[in-house]
Amino acid sequence: MSSFSPNTLSSMLSAVADIQMTVDAQGGVSGADLNTELSQLLEADKLSTDDWRDLIADRDKETAEAVLKAARSTPGETHKVDLDLYTGPQEECIPVSCWFCSDEVTKATKVVCKDLRSDTSVRQQLINAQRTLEQDYWSNRRLEARYRRMLDMISDGFLVIDDLGGRVLEANKNASVLLGLGENSIVGRAFPFGLSDEASRTIIELQKDSRSVNGIVSSQFNTMDGNTLTACMICLRQSNETRLLLRISPIKHHASELTIPRDAFEHAPDGILVTDNTGVVVTANAAYLKLAGINEEYQAIGRRADRWLGRSNVDLSVILANVDTDSPLQLFSTVLRTESGALLDVELSAAKTQINGQVMIISFIRDISRRIDRQYETEVHLPRSIEQITGRVGRVPLKQLVRESTDVIEALCVEAALKLTKDNRAAASELLGLSRQSLYTKLRRFDIGDSEDEVA
């Protein structure tokens, strides 16, 4: 193995090291050497001191002393530590990486230091960049949260579709409701789906047009529920990705456009619901919104009325089938399902009319759930006619209606027998084929005349 001269080793060490110091056995700095850049901040004579610890920052003094002690206990071995050196009383410290090595003969310790200011600058830049990325990340998260909350607040539906795969990337809640797909999530599914063939072709044509037109394209289509929607689409290209932004909204008609007197419409005590001839809500007054538990009018517009009216969609079909321009529907008994899930007994009267060339059905809805019905009275009284029984269809079970119908017919026959016999109980019982005791029982049951037993 070839050896190098001391001068050669010293020259190589000077080229690599930024600071060289020799600490004698008493702890003083007997010699120091600086490179050109550090000589502008430090002077070699300032490094010459009786106590080398004066050059070390206070927080590193204990560490530096421990490393020096370890180097002296193992001569010839190198010990490395990172320290901060003072450049002056009012100056900042210089971060350095130091190597300590003691000589067994002279007991002196050679300290070689490498300036770490460039490394510290790079580390600080990395920390600053990381903080900036974190701030941008949380800023984007807050922006995304606001964006999603705003989309859920509006009545229109919004979808973001991947043009390459055709799948829905993002969608607000109202999008699936307007498309008649319920509350199920449509994210991740290929679009269009759940639509008729004609509506699907309309959406596909919109997609083609949006790719070739630099702007918004729009069209109308019908859902499976019969709702007519307006679709607006625009193609957005970013980097290597292409997104289709689709907005769907119901066709809205405002009460002012329908020439309905606004003051009478809004302040009417009964609920007023205006629909088209398919049952899609066009507008509603404040009384109806309050009755159904709907916060804003836009939440009802564009949806079918059977979302709230009737125990099922059968009731709305009956209403639409029985309303005509010349024969309005009167006092139709049904229920109203509120947004909270409660059921209210209501009476509905409806009429069909032409407004601005459009066929509209105006329904007047009155809450009758607080009325005292005969079946809740303390004394049991049966319906007095078949019309009263048929008027309760949809409000009570069929078995109960059959029992009430039988009782009504029986009571009418007893009354007819008493009328024919001029209230002669014996003749009436014989006419009906009943015993006198059975007749008195039925008189008490149906509360007909004086039902007290005759005194023998």
Image (cartoon, rainbow, N blue to C red):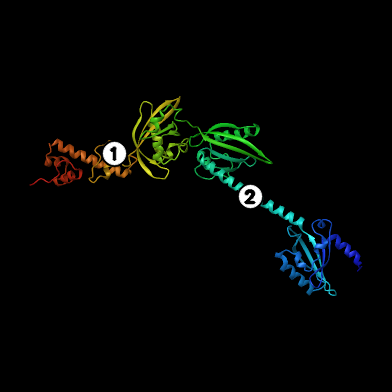
When asked about the image quadrant of residue 80, the answer is bottom right
The three-letter amino acid code for the residue at tag 2 is Gln
Report the Cα–Cα distance between label 1 and label 2.
71 Å
Percent position (x, y) of residue 104? 84, 74
Residue farthest along the top direction in this orientation = 357
When asked about the image quadrant of residue 274, the answer is top left
Among the two numbered marks 1 and 2 on one chain, the one whose residue lies closer to the N terminus: 2
Discs 1, 2 touching: Cβ within 8 Å: no
The three-letter amino acid code for the residue at tag 1 is Ile
- The residue to which callout 1 is attached is 389
Q: Nearer the viewer, mark 1 or mark 2?
A: 2
**Residue pictured at 19% horizontal, 43% vertical:** 447
**Residue pictured at 22% horizontal, 41% vertical:** 410
- The residue to which callout 2 is attached is 135
User: Callout 2 environment at 10 Å: few (<14), some (14 to 19), or many (20+)?
Assistant: few
On the question of residue 289 being in view, the answer is yes
Q: Is residue 368 left or right of residue 293?
A: left
Q: Is residue 422 left or right of residue 245?
A: left
Question: Is disc 2 placed on a helix, strand or loop?
Answer: helix
Q: Nearer the viewer, residue 155 or 102?
A: 102
Label annotation for residue 175: none
Percent position (x, y) of residue 228? 50, 33
User: Callout 1 environment at 10 Å: few (<14), some (14 to 19), or many (20+)?
Assistant: some
On the question of residue 310 being in view, the answer is no
Q: Is residue 242 left or right of residue 453?
A: right
- The mark total stands at 2
Note whether 3 is above or below 205 in the view shown: below
Q: Nearer the viewer, residue 380 or 130?
A: 130
Percent position (x, y) of residue 414? 18, 40
Percent position (x, y) of residue 392? 31, 39
Note whether 433 is above or below 284 in the view shown: below
